[in-house]
C-alpha cells in the first residue's frame, strides 16, 4: 500500500491503531449495513413478522413503518434495549476477532473457508466491496427518508 504520509507505518504508536483493526471494522460495519439495507428493503416490500411487537403497548409488527428512521421511532425503548443487548451478546460471544485468523474470519466450524488463496482473496474483496456498497445504500436510504421521501425512492411510489 502506498502511504506517502506513512499513516500505515509499523509499529503503531498511540492513539493511531493498526491497519488490520481498520480492516476488521470495515468488514464488520459492512456486514451490519448489508443487514440494515436488506431490512429496509424487506420491510418496505411489506414483509413483517406476525403478531405483536409489544403486547402491553398494543403495537403489532405490521404497525411499524418500513423506513429506517420511521421504524426506529416506532419501536419502544425496551425493544431497542433488547436488540442492543442481543447484539452485545453476539459481539462478545461470537464476534470476537481472533488475532491468529484473517480479518473478518469470526465464524465457527460451520463457516465457509477457502483453501485456494486466490479464491479466498477474491471472496474477501467481494465482501468488502459489497459492504462498502451497502454502507452507501443505507446512508442514501436514511437521507431520502430524512428529506421526506420514501427510503427506496424512486423505486417505490
Image (tube, rainbow, N blue to C red):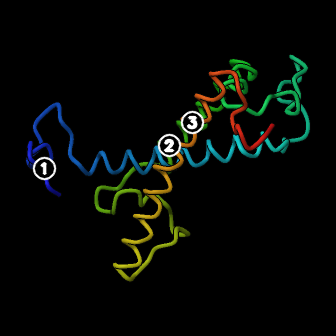
Separation of marks 2 and 1 at Cα, in angstroms? 25 Å
Give the image location of residue 56, x and y in percent. Answer: 87, 18
Front-most of residues 118 and 111: 118
Q: Is residue 17 left or right of residue 141?
A: left
- For disc 2, the marked residue is 135
Give the image location of residue 103, x and y in percent. Answer: 35, 57
Front-most of residues 27 and 140: 140
Q: Secondary structure at mark 3?
A: helix
Label number found at residue 140: 3
Label number found at residue 112: none
- Residue for point 40% across, 72% down: 122
Give neighbour class at mark 3: few <14, some 14-19, many 20+ (Cα, 10 Å): some
- Residue for point 33% across, 62% down: 102
Q: Earlier in the sequence, mark 2 or mark 3?
A: 2
Separation of marks 3 and 1 at Cα, in angstroms? 30 Å
- For disc 1, the marked residue is 3
Q: Is residue 117 left or right of residue 106?
A: left
Quarter-wise, where is residue 151 in the image? top right
Give the image location of residue 68, x and y in percent. Answer: 66, 31
Q: Is residue 58 left or right of residue 87?
A: right
Give the image location of residue 157, x and y in percent. Answer: 81, 37
Front-most of residues 82 and 128: 128
Separation of marks 2 and 3 at Cα, in angstroms? 9 Å
Q: Look at discs 2 and 3 and give the one toward the viewer.
A: 3
Give neighbour class at mark 2: few <14, some 14-19, many 20+ (Cα, 10 Å): many
Q: Look at discs 3 and 1 and give the one toward the viewer.
A: 3
Q: Is residue 67 above or below residue 4?
A: above
Q: Secondary structure at mark 2?
A: helix
Q: Secondary structure at mark 1?
A: loop
Amino acid at each position: 500500500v502506498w502511504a506517502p504520509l506513512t499513516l500505515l507505518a509499523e509499529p503503531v504508536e498511540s492513539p493511531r491503531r493498526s491497519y488490520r483493526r481498520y480492516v476488521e471494522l470495515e468488514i464488520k460495519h459492512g456486514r451490519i449495513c448489508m443487514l440494515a439495507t436488506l431490512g429496509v428493503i424487506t420491510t418496505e416490500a411489506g414483509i413483517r413478522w406476525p403478531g405483536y411487537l409489544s403486547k402491553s403497548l398494543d403495537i403489532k409488527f405490521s404497525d411499524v413503518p418500513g423506513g429506517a428512521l420511521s421504524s426506529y421511532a416506532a419501536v419502544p425503548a425496551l425493544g431497542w434495549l433488547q436488540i442492543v443487548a442481543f447484539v452485545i451478546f453476539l459481539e462478545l460471544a461470537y464476534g470476537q476477532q481472533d488475532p491468529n485468523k484473517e480479518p473478518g474470519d469470526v465464524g465457527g466450524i460451520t463457516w465457509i473457508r477457502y483453501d485456494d488463496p486466490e479464491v479466498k482473496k477474491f471472496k474477501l474483496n467481494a465482501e468488502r466491496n459489497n459492504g462498502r456498497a451497502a454502507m452507501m445504500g443505507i446512508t442514501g436510504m436514511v437521507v431520502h427518508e430524512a428529506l421526506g421521501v420514501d427510503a427506496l425512492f424512486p423505486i417505490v411510489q
